Amino acid sequence: MKYTLILFFLFPILGFAQQFIQGKDIIPFASIASSNYLLPSNRLTIDNAHSKLLEFRGSDSDVKKDKILGEYFFVNGFLVSTICESLNTLKEKKYPGINSTYLYLKQDYDPNTQYLSYENRGNIKILIFYINKLTELHFFIKNEKHSIMGSVLCKSVQKNEAQNFITTLTSTIKFN
């Protein structure tokens, strides 16, 4: 009876555990890579990430909490999202890869309104792209085992800072 009573009181506590990652087959960032910016102390719960998304995109945004994917960090005033997956999982989903994505984006690339950068650092590939007037910047990084797809959200007054930050951020990401 004593143990039943303890379990009865523990169930509500266990039901309200904080969730930091959301989505099928998504791997925690810290389990595959490290960065000076994407630290556990900067990681947000899904609830906090949802609130920040609404703050950055505006209250009329249709972002539903149960539909956001990945892991979120709040760094230097920017909301950073990451979706880390095994390349085997991505192959099953028929993801064409960073190089194909780069070639696709390059077809309609306009240097006056967009930014597009592709780096090949041996076994690590890095793709950064964004439209200059928007407040969401995107990056893809992969090695031979894993892929990190992410974005940096900023407020419109922070666009120039965010453009510098995304380059710095991607240069600090090191696979384990």
Image (cartoon, grey):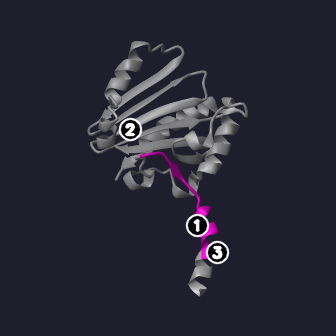
User: Quick one: label 2, few (<14), some, or many (20+) residues within 10 Å?
Assistant: many
Q: Are marks 1 and 3 in contact (CB under 8 Å)?
A: no
User: Quick one: label 1, few (<14), some, or many (20+) residues within 10 Å?
Assistant: few
Query: Does the magenta portion include 9?
Result: yes
Which label sits on residue 14?
A: 1
At mark 1, the secondary structure is: helix
> Which numbered disc, 3 or 2, marks the residue closer to the eye?
3
Q: Residue at x 44, y 23 (%)?
A: 116
Residue 149, by quadrant, is top left
Of residues 76 and 89, the one nearer the viewer is 89
Amino acid at dot 3: Phe
Amino acid at dot 2: Ile
**Apparent side of residue 171 relative to residue 2 in the rendered image (left or right):** left
At mark 2, the secondary structure is: strand
User: Quick one: label 3, few (<14), some, or many (20+) residues within 10 Å?
Assistant: few
Question: Sequence-wise, which precedes: disc 1 or disc 3?
Answer: 3
Residue 100 spot, x, y in % from top left: 33, 24
The number of numbered discs placed on residues in the rendered structure image is 3
Q: Are marks 3 and 2 in contact (CB under 8 Å)?
A: no
Which stretch appears magenta? 8-24
> Which numbered disc, 1 or 3, marks the residue closer to the eye?
3
Residue 103, above or below 85: above
**Apparent side of residue 159 relative to residue 35 in the rendered image (left or right):** right
Outermost residue to the front: 1
> Which numbered disc, 1 or 2, marks the residue closer to the eye?
1
Name the residue that disc number 2 marks.
Answer: 141
Name the residue that disc number 3 marks.
Answer: 9
Q: Residue at x 48, y 13 (%)?
A: 110
Q: Residue at x 58, y 43 (%)?
A: 66
